[in-house]
Amino acid sequence: MSIPNLLAVIRLILTPIAMALILASPSSDRVKIAAVVVFVAAALTDFADGFLARRWQITTTFGAFLDLLADKVLVAGALIALVEIGTVSSWAAFLIIGREIAVMALRGVAALGQSTVPASFWGKSKAAIQFVAVGMAILEPDIVLGPWRLDQWLIWLAVVVTLVSAGDYFGRFRAVFSTQRDAV
């Protein structure tokens, strides 16, 4: 197993640990700090695995799949835990997780037609903003800006960028739905 793929596996392993810490975080500031450290460490593996795979020219279809899966599992797991403790709106989590499923489905349909849906500027921006927003939601800083705390603003910014990213992908790759295919 290559180091980039190992980093994606580590991200998958860290996800339930981050979730457990998030779920326990309302009881202690120390647990809250531990949760954000584990989440940030997992998020950093996302940037490291892609960078190393490209730098070492060892990109593979399996590695790309594993990387995308690990990203989605990390963000979805953290959001679900944050909804459970009442820090994140279930609507925000639904929109973010729904987008991730929709774009993965788009990639699956594109693969049936032997094409790919490469990451875009919006997709990469979305990932970075989601990681920052979720990290801040774990910390839940007492910084109030108008009607919401800073972390709530960041979660909704992540929702907006996530939806813009979905629009970008579906707009650029709508042709994958218009070609005739055999029934699956």
Image (spheres, rainbow, N blue to C red):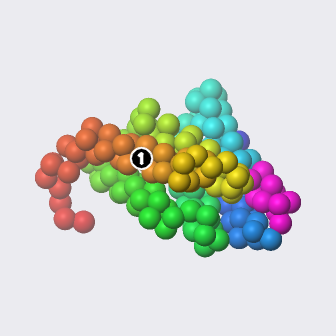
Is residue 32 part of the magenta span, yes or no? Answer: yes
- Is 114 drawn above or below residue 84 in the view shown? above
Q: Position of residue 108 (x, y in %)?
A: 35, 54
Q: How many marks?
A: 1
Q: Position of residue 5 (x, y in %)?
A: 64, 47
**10 Å crowding of disc 1: few (<14), some (14-19), many (20+):** some
Magenta highlight: main SS: helix
Is residue 102 part of the magenta span, yes or no? Answer: no
Q: Which residue is mark 1?
A: 160
Residue at 47% x, 60% y: name it: 92
Q: Quadrant of residue 116?
A: top left
- Mark yes or no: residue 105 visible: yes
Looking at this rendering, what residue extends furthest in the right direction?
Answer: 30
Residue at 46% x, 56% y: name it: 96
Q: Which residues are magenta?
A: 28-37
- Is 181 drawn above or below residue 128 in the view shown? below
Residue at 60% x, 69% y: name it: 86
Q: Nearer the viewer, residue 152 or 113?
A: 152
